[in-house]
Image (cartoon, rainbow, N blue to C red):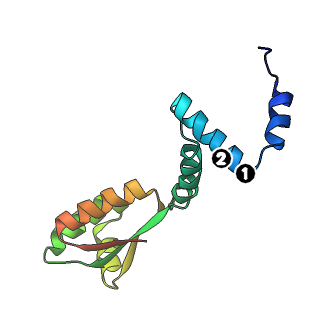
Amino acid sequence: MAKLNNEDIIASLKEMSILELNDLVKAIEEEFGVSAAAPVAAAAAAPVEASAPTEVSVFIKEIGGSKVGVIKVLKDITGLGMMEVNGLLKELPATIKENVKPEEAEEIKAKLVEAGAVVEIK
């Protein structure tokens, strides 16, 4: 049997009906243990991942029961002094950090929640 080149294969495929092409695809899948649907599923998943936010902001909504604990954590996170942190907490909700990576925002939230605060990430 003579070896077929790409042009011969394509010319042969152009002459086939949709049903014949479907049968061919099924036969190739069975013969080689592959699936023609797998690349489509992977390509469809990519846009979903791309829509995840790359930067978020952290807001404190409530101080909670331990104001001193929350103030200590806020001083560490923001680098502000005691007076600045107290001023920040006078009008809630207040922005703690803006345009940070989601991972960093989750770490900040965990520290503040542990201290008793109610925190939101947007």
Residue 79 seen in the figure: no
Describe the element under mark 1 as helix, strand or loop: helix
Q: Which residue is the extreme one toward the top?
A: 1
In front of the other: 89 or 117 = 117
Question: Residue 67 appears at what percent x and percent y?
Answer: 18, 75
Residue 24 seen in the figure: yes
In front of the other: 74 or 60 = 60
Query: Residue at label 2?
Result: 22
Left or right: where does residue 69 sit relative to residue 82? left
Question: Residue 39 appears at what percent x and percent y?
Answer: 58, 44
Q: Which residue is the extreme one toward the bottom?
A: 91
The residues tagged by marks 1 and 2 sit, at their Cα atoms, a distance apart of 6 Å
Residue at image position (25%, 65%) is 112
In front of the other: 48 or 90 = 48
Q: Which residue is the extreme one toward the left?
A: 65
In front of the other: 32 or 46 = 32
Left or right: where does residue 4 sit relative to residue 67? right
Residue at image position (73%, 51%) is 18
Residue at image position (60%, 34%) is 28
Query: Residue at label 1?
Result: 18
Q: Amino acid at mark 1?
A: Ile
Q: Note whether 21 is above or below 98 in the view shown.
A: above
The answer to whether marks 1 and 2 mark residues whose Cβ atoms lie closer than 8 Å is: yes
Question: Residue 110 appears at what percent x and percent y?
Answer: 25, 61
Q: Note whether 1 is above or below 21 in the view shown.
A: above
Question: Residue 85 appears at what percent x and percent y?
Answer: 31, 72
Q: Note whether 83 is above or below 13 in the view shown.
A: below
Q: Note whether 38 is above or below 60 in the view shown.
A: above
**Residue density around tag 2, few if under 14, some if 14–19, many if 20 or more, within 10 Å:** few
Left or right: where does residue 99 sit relative to residue 15? left
Q: Amino acid at mark 2?
A: Asn
